[in-house]
């Protein structure tokens, strides 16, 4: 007897926490994960507050102490800007229909064809830009040192981000490319993953390798990399661990923010090789115009996410250099 070399997506997992239960059926895992993410960020910022990492000195040399209300206000402002940026980026960059460019008022319209659909579709990179602008705005309005507060938030973000990717997994979305690794997972077909005819030679050979039986007349739903969990691990837990170990040893304000930007871009760039690009966008750069998106045929096939991650890495390096130079000048001026 041969055992299948893949895992079926757990049948008990549904996007709704209480499926088929009136009213409670509207509560979704994804929304709960967002709440846990923001709660985690608040908890870590409170810990940094106790360490004195958020206190500063004003222009008159007086100590400006931070309160929990300040933290809450800072996070709330960041969340608002983050959600706006994530939604705008998702509709204007990742949507290929062009509808949102011609009808921009639909970006925040939660109805489609007379039905409530919510604001489905969020972009991490758009949220990154929006959240960054929100933090800058809050620091300007409250006259706080911008890079110090951004450093604190970037210490808190990765652990919270872990919950976001777990939410994607619970939704059965953002899955990876097809794979023969034993932890490859057969995701549910809603949202519908691409299926293949078992009569095709490469498909039947693929199924033989993993011990999947073909059923006459049916399309095969092949196992895929659980790339959401890869991201939760590396862009979340691993990146958080690195930053947390170094956060008390940062050489200058702006270091942690730069490290987060570089680290996230680095991990996400390589995980994109396992994650399937959006079907309607495909690759931004490719060595083969006929390259398929459901498997990785070349490291030179570059997705939209990889382009944006490259910009993040370059931006993080530039920010670290600039902040380092400004810190040296500040120290030099203090010695005069």
Image (spheres, rainbow, N blue to C red):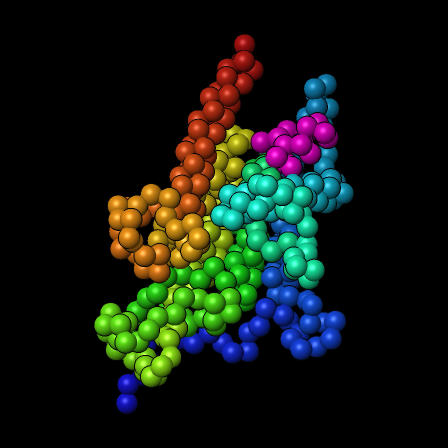
The answer to whether residue 57 is left or right of residue 85 is right
Q: Position of residue 154 (x, y in %)?
A: 55, 42
**Residue for point 28% across, 85% down:** 2
The C terminus is located in which quarter?
top right
Q: Position of residue 291 (x, y in %)?
A: 29, 53
Q: Quadrant of residue 266?
A: top left
Q: How many marks?
A: 0
Answer whether residue 142 is magenta in the image.
yes
Compared with 182, 239 (above or below) is above
The magenta segment is 133-147
Q: Nearer the viewer, residue 335 or 55?
A: 55
**Residue for point 47% across, 67% down:** 192
Q: Position of residue 76 (x, y in %)?
A: 70, 44
Answer whether residue 139 is magenta in the image.
yes
Farthest residue to the right: give it: 69
Q: Nearer the viewer, residue 289 or 222?
A: 289
**Visible residue check, residue 221:** yes
The N terminus is located in which quarter?
bottom left
Q: Position of residue 304 (x, y in %)?
A: 42, 45
**Residue for point 59% across, 41% down:** 102
**Residue for point 52% across, 49% down:** 97
Magenta stretch: helix, strand or loop mostly = helix
Q: Quadrant of residue 61?
A: top right
Farthest residue to the bottom: give it: 1
Q: Nearer the viewer, residue 291 or 303?
A: 291
Q: Nearer the viewer, residue 25 or 234?
A: 25
Compared with 125, 166 (above or below) is below
């Amino acid at each position: 007897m041969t055992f299948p070399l893949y895992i079926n997506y757990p049948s008990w997992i549904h996007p709704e926490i209480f499926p088929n239960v009136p009213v409670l059926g509207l509560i979704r895992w994804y929304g709960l994960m967002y709440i846990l993410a923001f709660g985690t960020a608040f908890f870590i910022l409170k810990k940094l507050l106790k360490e004195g990492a958020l206190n500063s000195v004003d222009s008159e040399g007086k100590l400006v102490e931070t309160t929990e209300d300040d933290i809450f206000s800072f996070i709330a402002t960041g969340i608002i800007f983050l959600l706006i940026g994530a939604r705008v980026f998702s509709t204007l960059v990742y949507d290929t229909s062009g509808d949102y460019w011609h009808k921009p008022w639909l970006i925040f319209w939660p109805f489609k064809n007379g039905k409530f659909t919510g604001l489905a579709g969020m972009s991490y990179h758009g949220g990154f830009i929006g959240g960054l602008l929100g933090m800058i705005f809050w620091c300007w309005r409250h006259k706080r040192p911008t890079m110090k507060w951004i450093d604190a938030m970037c210490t808190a973000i990765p652990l919270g981000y872990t919950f976001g990717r777990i939410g994607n997994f619970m939704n059965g979305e953002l899955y990876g490319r097809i794979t023969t690794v034993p932890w490859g997972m057969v995701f549910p077909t809603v949202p519908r993953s691409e299926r293949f005819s078992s009569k095709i030679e490469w498909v039947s050979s693929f199924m033989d390798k993993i011990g999947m039986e073909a059923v006459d007349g049916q399309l095969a739903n092949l196992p895929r990399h659980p790339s959401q969990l890869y991201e939760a691990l590396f862009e979340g837990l691993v990146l958080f661990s690195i930053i947390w170990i170094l956060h008390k040893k940062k050489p200058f304000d702006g270091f942690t923010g730069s490290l987060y930007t570089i680290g996230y871009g680095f991990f996400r760039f390589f995980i994109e090789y396992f994650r399937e690009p959006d079907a309607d966008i495909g690759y931004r750069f490719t060595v083969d115009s006929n390259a398929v998106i459901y498997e990785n045929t070349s490291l030179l096939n570059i997705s939209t996410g990889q382009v944006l991650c490259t910009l993040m890495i370059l931006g993080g390096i530039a920010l670290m250099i600039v902040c380092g130079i400004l810190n040296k000048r500040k120290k030099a001026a203090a010695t005069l």
